[in-house]
Amino acid sequence: MRLDLTYRTSYHYTPAIHGGVTALRLRPISRPGLNVISSSLTASPGRVVSSYRDGWDSHVDLVEIRGLHEVAVFEVRATVETVFGEADLPPTAREWELYRSDSARVRRQAVVPLGWHVGGEGGAWQAVESALQFIPQRFIYQVGATDAGTPIESVIEAGFGVCQDFAHVFLSILRSWGWCARYISGYLFSAELGEANASAEAMHAWVEVYRHGAGWIGLDPTAGKHADERYIVVGHGRDYDDVRPVRGVIVGATAQTQLTSLTMQ
C-alpha cells in the first residue's frame, strides 16, 4: 500500500524562549514490511544539525534553534510503501531479555489488579487475542485524560487513557505472561482500506509480540485488532521513552502548548 503523509507538530511558548535543541523521532526508515521512498523534515525556525540512527535503530533528526522565538514548528513529509506480512528479524538474545522484562513505563505487577493469570505460549495465544479484545472494552479512549508521565497504575485505576497508555498496559499483560513484546511508535492511516485519505491529531502507538513460528505480530490494543498495511512503523523499544517522538532542551522559563496534525492519502 502506497501512502503519502504529512505530520506537523508545533510548540507555542509564553513567554518567548531564547533557543533550544530538539531530538525528533518522526521520520520512518525502510525496514522489513516498509519501504520509505522519500522523507524530509523541516523546522521553522531552526535547522537540522545532525541526523543519525540511535541504539534502537530509530532515525533521529537533531534540530537547533537559536534566538528569541514564541513558536517552533516541525513538519515531516514522507512517501512510503507498506508490505503486509513481510517478516522482521527475530529478536536477538539482548532483545529477548529486554522485551520480556519490566521497563520504566511497563511494570508487570501493575496489571495484577486486572486478574488475568494466563502464562506460556502455544495454546495461550488465544489469551493474547482475548486480551487484545479486552483492552478497548475495559478502557475508554479519552484525549487529554493522561499525559506522557501518567503511570499505568493510574490508567488502570481510572479506566481511561490514550493509545500509548493502552500499549503500555497491553505490554505489561503480555510480559507478565512471558511473551517477548515491544512498543511501536508510528503513523496510522485511519480510514478504511480503499478510501482516499485520512486525518488525525497525533501519532499512534501499538504493540508487536513475537510468536514462534509466526514472527513479530502487530497488535493494536486501542482498536482491539491486528495491525495491517495501514500501519507505518517509525520506531520500536521497551516503552514510550525509547521512541519518544520529541525530546528537547529549551533556554528560558516558559509555559508551552503543543498542537499536532496528521494527514495521509
Image: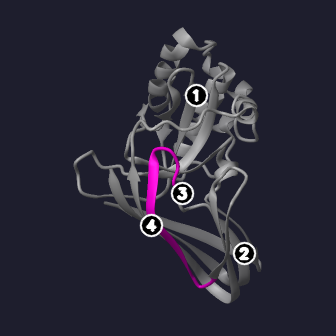
Residue 51, quarter of picture: bottom right
- Give the amino acid type for the residue marked by disc 2 in the picture: Val
The Cα atoms of the two marked residues, 4 and 2, are separated by 25 Å
- Residue identified by numbered label 4: 38
Give the class, few, some or many, for how many residues have Cα within 10 Å of label 2's Cα (few <14, many ≥20): some
- Residue identified by numbered label 2: 21
- Give the amino acid type for the residue marked by disc 3 in the picture: Ile
- Give the amino acid type for the residue marked by disc 1 in the picture: Tyr
- Residue identified by numbered label 3: 29
- Span shown in magenta: 29-46
Q: Look at the picture and state if 261 lies above or below 134.
A: below
Q: Earlier in the sequence, mark 3 or mark 1?
A: 3
Kindly identify which numbered label has been placed on residue 232.
none
- Give the amino acid type for the residue marked by disc 4 in the picture: Ser
Comparing labels 3 and 2, the label whose residue is closer to the camera: 3
Q: Which of marks 3 and 2 is nearer the N terminus?
A: 2
Q: Which of marks 3 and 4 is nearer the N terminus?
A: 3
Comparing labels 1 and 2, the label whose residue is closer to the camera: 1
Furthest-bottom residue in this view: 67
What is the chief secondary structure element of the magenta stretch? Answer: strand
Kindly identify which numbered label has been placed on residue 210.
1
Comparing labels 4 and 1, the label whose residue is closer to the camera: 4
Is disc 3 in contact with disc 4, using a CB cutoff of under 8 Å? no
